[in-house]
Image (cartoon, rainbow, N blue to C red):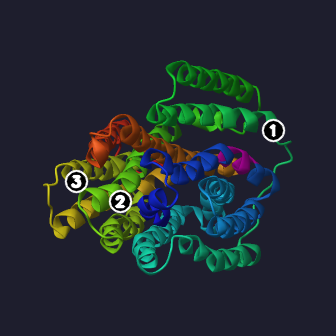
Amino acid sequence: MMVNLALPSLSRDFAVEPAHIVWVVNVYQVVIAICLFPLGALGERFGHKTIYFWGMLLFTVGSALCAEASGFATLIAARALQGIGAAGIMSVNIALVRFIFPRRLIGRGIGYNTLIVALSTTAGPTLGSLILSVAPWPWLFIVNIPLGVIGTVLAAAALPPSPRSSRAHDWAGAGLIALAVGLPILAVDGIGRGDAIPLLAVQFVLGILFLVLLVRHQLARPEPMLPLDLLRTPIIRLSAATSSCSYIVQGLSFVALPFYFHDSLGLDLLDVGLLMTPWPLAVAVASPISGRLSDRYSAGALGTLGLALLALGMALLALLPAAPAHWDILWRMSLCGLGFGLFQTPNSRAIIMHAPANRSGGASAIQAGSRLLGQALGAALVATIFGSLPQLGPIGAIYLGALFAGLACLVSSLRLDWRKTT
């Protein structure tokens, strides 16, 4: 989130077009999406605590390298290393919650976890804008270093052990995941760059081919790295689809809105950070409440209500007047965050609690993977709009976000049941 605020500054400093500078965000998300399932599988083999520890350590090292980056390519490489570390953390995060909290309090545990993430995200825009108002962009990464060191030490000392599997790691599956995920995203970005149509077609076709090979390869394994066995459960499948659609909205918005506030409205970076804050702050407020409710009511009911509020908030953001008052933006952002927070925790609970305990790593990877896939696609869609349809600008991206929020609400409604099911 802090890095998103720096995109306009990075674009100027590195003399890189906006359609390309978004890869500072994209490469991080794409690498996470590629590494998430392999690292989730390694968590089931070597223990979730071990993967979390090494993920935190790599993220900290990547932050230091980002701060030292002297060119665009170097920054992209360092962000990729950060992404590997973040994938390790995300792949086992919710699985660890399952081994920390008793079953009857899982919803609350996920709610507390979401609260911490949301509070961090809330502080991000304000802290990032304050940093950028007094210091250059490398300080956005420097502040991660002491926090990463503390997190690494705490992970080693405090996280509980978890069951381990004796299965061999599926390196072929990991390679197929990288190709099946990476090629289509590169093709979407290539549309924005104006790449030749034959090249784009080859990338899309190869991506589909590798996806088919991946599915066939995984179906032949008793405990697949790509948890297709879990996706056979309807509630998990629908929850993952709902999550992807909703995170497209978030990923798209968190990239497009800073450009809208800074370039279209002419606001300074401090104002941009403050205007981005209400969304994650409202998520932080709603998450513990929805966590408690998720122990009583179904994810379909809570998620559909929350996503309806998100769709309404996005539509209202898209319909902002030409020179809106700060208050008009703040309450719309708060409505988006409230709806997102109401949806997020029950959806995560539905995924993790409908999976067997020995497949918690796979369920956690589904939860995180659907999120990162959505965020990466959202950012790639913004790059496509900026590159191929610049006349639409950030507002065009916000309209698209409203459509995806409505789609997420529709998918969530397929799970609609006011009774708690698990």
Query: Which residues are drawn in magenta?
Result: 36-41
**Vertical comparison of 201 with 411: above or below:** above
Give the mark nearer the N terminus: 1 vs 2. 1
Query: Does 48 sit above or below residue 300?
Result: below
- Amino acid, disc 3: Leu
**Circles 1, 3 touching at the beta carbon (< 8 Å):** no
Question: Alpha carbon of mark 1 to alpha carbon of mark 2: how far?
Answer: 39 Å
Q: Is residue 301 above or below residue 185?
A: below
Q: Which mark is residue 317?
A: 3
Whether residue 342 is visible to the viewer of this picture, yes or no, is no
Which residue appears at 37% of the width and 67% of the height?
289
Is residue 329 rendered to the left or right of residue 189?
left
Asked which secondary structure carries label 1, the reply is: helix
Q: Which residue is mark 1?
A: 171
* 248 drawn magenta: no
Task: Name which of mark 2 and mark 3 comes first in the sequence.
Answer: 2
Q: Nearer the viewer, mark 1 or mark 3?
A: 3
Residue at position x 57%, y 23% in the image: 199
Residue beneath the point at 63% across and 52% down? 73
* Dot 1 or dot 3, earlier in sequence: 1
Amino acid marked by disc 1:
Trp
Instruction: Name the mark on residue 258.
Output: 2
Residue at image location 61% in from the left, 51% down from the top: 364
Q: Nearer the viewer, residue 77 or 11?
A: 11
Relative to 326, 147 lies left or right: right
Left or right for 312, reference 97: left
Mark 2 packing: few (<14 Cα in 10 Å), some, or many (20+)? Answer: many
Tell me residue 263's x, y (percent). Answer: 30, 58
